[in-house]
């Protein structure tokens, strides 16, 4: 059998679904490595929640989960990690006794800015083979696919 290690059969290798899954795997790997190297143990979920809180302001845990697409149980665990690092603060919602309101702290905003640099670097790695015009077109086409 004459094939390349890690390659795909001819009927698979040019299909958009295969290419998208390979691009996802590559970008996810680069992002994980970037966060590991420069994020102090933080991951994409942490970044997404910090970004949401910084942009949208204080929110309930449930609202954060829905708005960011992160499962409710994962939101609770990730927020506990962020809180233990002093990056977010949780307080009881006076209007709803059992609900917590989460707020990003000044340290959380500073950490978010550092992570922005990590994410920017990964974007550059992922898109490196493309010209600026191709990058804009690629992002526009991806956005269109996602509707």
Image (cartoon, rainbow, N blue to C red):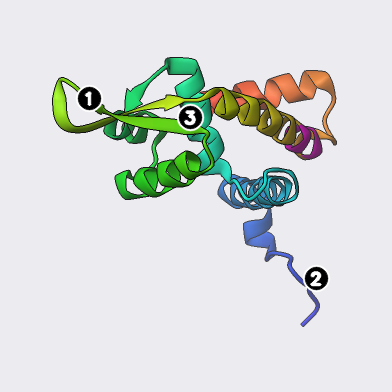
Q: What stretch is highlighted in magenta?
A: 121-125
Q: What residue is rendered at 68% in x and 43% in y?
A: 39
Marks 2 and 1 sit apart, C-alpha to C-alpha, by: 58 Å
Q: Nearer the viewer, residue 97 or 28?
A: 97
The x and y percentages for residue 106 are 56, 22
**93 displayed left or right of 58:** left
Q: Does the magenta stretch include residue 41?
A: no
Which of pointers 2 and 1 lies earlier in the amino acid sequence? 2
The residue tagged 2 is 4
Looking at the rendering, which quadrant does residue 69 occupy?
A: top left
Q: Evaluate if marks 3 and 2 touch, with contact meaning CB atoms under 8 Å apart.
A: no
Q: Residue 93 carries which label?
A: 1
For discs 3 and 2, the disc positioned in front in the rendered view: 3
- Dividing the image into 4 quarters, which one contains the N terminus? bottom right
Above or below, 65 relative to 27? above
Q: In which quarter of the image is residue 97?
A: top left
Q: Of the numbered discs in the image, which one, if any, rests on residue 146?
A: 3
- What residue appears at the point 63 percent right and 50 percent down from the top-left corner? 41
Q: Which of marks 1 and 3 is in front?
A: 1
Task: Name the element at disc 3.
Answer: loop
**Predominant SS of the magenta segment:** helix
The image position of residue 12, as x and y in percent, is: 62, 59
Cα–Cα gap, marks 3 and 2? 32 Å
Q: Which of 90 and 1 is in front in this view?
A: 90
Left of 55 or right of it: where is 140? right
Q: Is 122 colored magenta in this rendering? A: yes
- The numbered mark, 1 or 3, whose residue comes first in the sequence reads 1
As drawn, is 73 to the left or to the right of 6?
left
Residue 136 percent coordinates (x, y): 71, 19
């Amino acid at each position: 059998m004459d094939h390349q290690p890690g390659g795909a059969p001819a009927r698979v290798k040019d299909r958009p679904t295969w290419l998208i899954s390979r691009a996802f795997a590559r970008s996810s790997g680069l992002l994980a490595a970037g966060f590991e190297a420069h994020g102090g143990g933080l991951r994409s979920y942490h970044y997404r929640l910090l970004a949401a809180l910084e942009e949208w302001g204080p929110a309930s845990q449930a609202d954060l989960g829905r708005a960011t697409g992160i499962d409710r149980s994962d939101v609770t665990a990730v927020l506990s990690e962020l809180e233990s690092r002093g990056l977010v603060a949780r307080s009881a919602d006076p209007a709803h006794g059992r609900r917590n309101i989460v707020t990003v702290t000044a340290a959380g905003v500073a950490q978010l800015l550092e992570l922005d640099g990590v994410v920017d670097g990964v974007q550059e790695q992922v898109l490196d083979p493309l010209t600026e015009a191709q990058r804009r077109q690629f992002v526009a086409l991806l956005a269109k696919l996602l509707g």
